[in-house]
Amino acid sequence: MQPWRLAEINYGRIKGEPAFDVAVLPLGATEPHNLHLPYGTDTFQVEVIADRACAWAHERGARVVLLPAIPYGTETNQMRFPMAMNLNPRTLARVIGDLVDSLQTHGVDRCLILNGHGGNDLKWVLREMHGSTKVQLFLCNWFRMIADVYPTIFEARDDHAGEMETSMGLAHFGHLVEMERADSGAVRASRFEAVNRGWVEITRPWHLLTTNSGAGDPRGASAAKGEAVTDLVVERIGEFLRDLAATRVDATFPF
């Protein structure tokens, strides 16, 4: 039993007293990841990171609770691939909102939404909920936390099921990785240069963008690279959770 994991602890351990200052809500997905990674890749990754970050903060005195991960995300652009399981953005927002309402009822007034799926566009959810809840919300897309060190660890940029995610798979759920099945993760360029440069954004139809849902070459992956990324992200998130738990909510919070 780990005292920061809500799914593992019992009522007897928290009855009669405010037990937690900060909650962590991990968000994953159920979708294909090239031909070699499991459908639960996003969920498995974010669960490892969330658990280790909460452990890091707990060991330094933070009263933090890890909520069970939501294993579904927005998959509207992957629905041409079998068994991609979609929650529309408004549905996912409702789920998050109901859980935040639960936290408010139970006196937890700070929450980190820890997102592990690139298809979950959630900043608008925080904006919509601002002012309607007493819970102070924070959003972290963990895969964006390593931009400053990415070139020192990986050979090529990862978008989906490439070197970085495959390294995470090899490090944390290697028994589910079948590298011999992987394709090169080649992607098709748009006919519009403004889209290719990122000046104009679209929702990318993944069955046209990729061959087998992978975007990024996984062949340079290793478990050591996955552990290096995990250690860095866990420490950065853990430090934030420790600081967040130690900072009381007042009239000017978070400034």
Image (tube, helix red, strand yellow):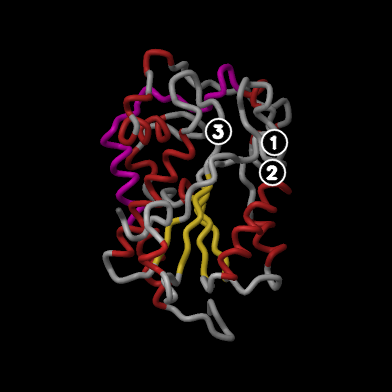
**For the residues marked 1 and 3, what is the alpha-carbon distance in whole angstroms?**
27 Å
Seen from the viewer's position, the closer of residues 208 and 192 is 208
> In the displayed structure, does residue 210 sit left or right of residue 184?
right
Q: Residues within 10 Å of mark 1 (few under 14, many from 20)?
A: few
- Mark 3 or 2: the one toward you: 3
Task: Check whether the beta carbons of the residues at disc 3 and disc 2 lie within 8 A of each other.
Answer: no
Task: Check whether the beta carbons of the residues at disc 2 and disc 1 lie within 8 A of each other.
Answer: yes
**Residue reaching furthest top?**
180
- The amino acid type of the residue labelled 3 equals Thr
Q: Position of residue 249 (x, y in %)?
A: 52, 80
Highlighted magenta segment, given as a residue range: 210-235
Mark 3 sits on what residue? Answer: 30
Verify whether residue 226 appears in magenta: yes
From what the image shows, is residue 83 above or below residue 92? above
Seen from the viewer's position, the closer of residues 36 and 159 is 36
Q: Residues within 10 Å of mark 2 (few under 14, many from 20)?
A: few
> In the displayed structure, does residue 231 sit left or right of residue 128?
left
Residue 199, label in figure: 2
> In the displayed structure, does residue 126 sit left or right of residue 154?
right
Residue 247, label in figure: none
Which residue is depicted at the point 39% across and 77% down?
246
**For the residues marked 3 and 2, what is the alpha-carbon distance in whole angstroms?**
29 Å
Which residue is depicted at the point 44% across and 75% down?
18
- The amino acid type of the residue labelled 2 equals Trp
Seen from the viewer's position, the closer of residues 213 and 158 is 213
| Res 250 → quadrant | bottom right
Mark 1 sits on what residue? Answer: 195
Q: Position of residue 10 (x, y in %)?
A: 39, 59
Q: Position of residue 252 (x, y in %)?
A: 57, 84
